[in-house]
Image (tube, grey):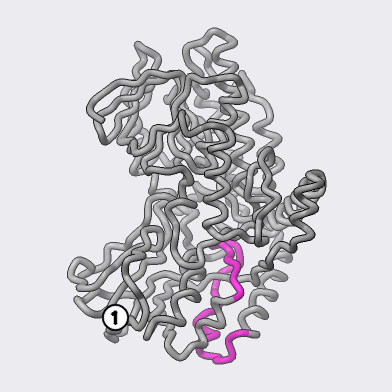
Amino acid sequence: MGERRVETGVIVIGTGFSGLGMAIQLRRDGREDFVVLEKADDVGGTWRDNTYPGCACDIQSHMYSFSFEQNPNWTRSFSPQGEIWDYLRRVADKYDLRRKIHFGVRVTGARWDADEARWHVATESGAEYVARFLVAGTGALHIPNVPDLPGLATFAGPAFHSAQWNHDYDLTGKRVAVIGTGASAIQFVPQIAPRVAELHLFQRTPPWIMPKPDHAVPDWARTLFNRVPGAQRAYRALLYWLLESRAAGFNGHPAMLRLGQRFARWNMERSITDPVLRAKLTPDYTMGCKRVLVANDFYPTLNRPNVHLVTDGVAEIRPTAVVDRAGIEHEVDAIIFGTGFHVTDGFDYLNLTGRDGRDLAKQWRTDGIGTHLGMTVAGYPNLFFLLGPNTGLGHNSVVFMIESQIRYVAEAIRLTERDLAATIEVRQAAQDRFQTDIQRKLAKGVWSTGGCTSWYLDAKGVNRTIWPGFTWRYWQRTRRVNAADFDLL
């Protein structure tokens, strides 16, 4: 492409639900002065990248979609990856977004120029994008977390992360090590177990797993949703409130969690009859402290004679084996990492320079991650995060949060322009009030009191990921931009 400079009004980074939703909102506001930067060659974000066998959503499809662009044709109650990716591609086409998207553009950093009152976004190709407003819709689940295990570089076979699945390698008849038992692993392990010779599953901490109420959406229901849009809206509302009720258990109501744990134990006991294996699979922390997973086929898979659960941890990797901490060598041909993503430490990869040269990644490493409503940061004018810190969920659909945020960001941009201001920047006092309030609530939640360490927490044990409480309260707080929280200059 060569070096070039592109000037516009708004730069949006990413084409997952956040980036596409923001672009649609800008269009609805009658704006054409925006570009969307996408590192890949198609839209879709995490639903484009994660193509491992069995990849699917763990929130019901009819909630995991835009409220303004519902899909009456989901084939299952919990959609597989391909259907969600198809949905996002259809949305991009319907709203004619592709001509606003610059594909193959990998952002390497951005700096605020106070004299120009503009963000300068640098890219891997050398092209520079300049705009008044910068909206980061990169999400939290896009930087694979591959542990730095001793000897990994010496391994002779393929070793890959579930988000970078090697489809060219045939696992049939191979001896495979799977490291990690999180949300991705419990989906792909049952898919690959029947065709591999041996599967050694390395578990650090067992997850709480609930049955997955997944089923094919019957033809009559799809016909109804197509012909009577109000029926789908009503079904979506029912799902929303059912999911929303789970928030009470996570936020200081242990009786609900105890009931959930009994159900999860029953779910395990009906599938796992071996008491030794059952003990290894029983968590020693309160449900909800880590992400609660849903699956029907994971526990039955562990009963297979070719599947071996290893709970001694990984000591080192050798050219043809994984050695556990008990010193046992497990001969394998391939290693698959189901070890999740860099979430709280994912912000270390940011290269954002704000007002007076402040470095956001360094600032957050030193002082802790701090935002206002997960979207704006004091010292970084005209910058907005979508699905940023403390707006993730453990109980409902993040698409609901994204929709609240894109409306809020659009209103903040309109407010800036209406006041003929060059910049909008959250006041430190407003940010501090938000952080004090949210951390006080999080301290009472199961993520902080449940007796575990999770990817919700940063290196200092502070929850920088989850929104504590009900999503309707977040919707309430973001319905209007409170101008008193901001400096408009």
Q: Is residue 170 left or right of residue 94?
A: left
Residue 388 shows in the view: yes
Q: Magenta segment range?
A: 271-296
Residue situated in front as seen by the camera: 200 or 66: 66
* Residue plotted at (61% across, 42% down): 401
Quadrant of the rendering where the N terminus is positioned? top left
Whether 76 is drawn above or below 195: the answer is above
Seen in the picture, residue 412 relative to 174 is either above or below; the reply is above
- As rendered, which of 446 and 276 lies closer to the eye? 276
Which residue is at 53% across, 39% downward? 18
Position of 446 relative to 431 (above/below): below
Q: Quadrant of residue 219?
A: bottom right
* Residue drawn where x is 41% and y is 50% of the image: 142
Q: Is residue 414 above or below residue 407?
A: above
Question: In x, y percent, where is residue 419?
Answer: 58, 9
Task: Tell whether position 71 is magenta.
Answer: no
Residue type (three-letter) at the residue carrying disc 1: Val
**Residue 118: horizontal and vertical position, in percent?**
39, 17
* Magenta segment includes 288: yes
Residue 29 % position (x, y): 61, 21
| Quadrant housing residue 446 | bottom right
Q: Secondary structure at mark 1?
A: loop
What residue is disc 1 on?
332
Task: From the viewer's side, name the closer residue of 83 and 237.
Answer: 83
Number of labels in the image equals 1
Packing grade of label 1 (10 A; few <14, some 14-19, many >=20) is many
Residue 38 percent across, percent down from the top left: 40, 38
Residue 432 appears in the rendering: no
Q: Residue furthest top?
A: 420
What is the magenta segment's predominant secondary structure? Answer: loop
In percent of the image, x 43 and y 25: which residue is there? 380
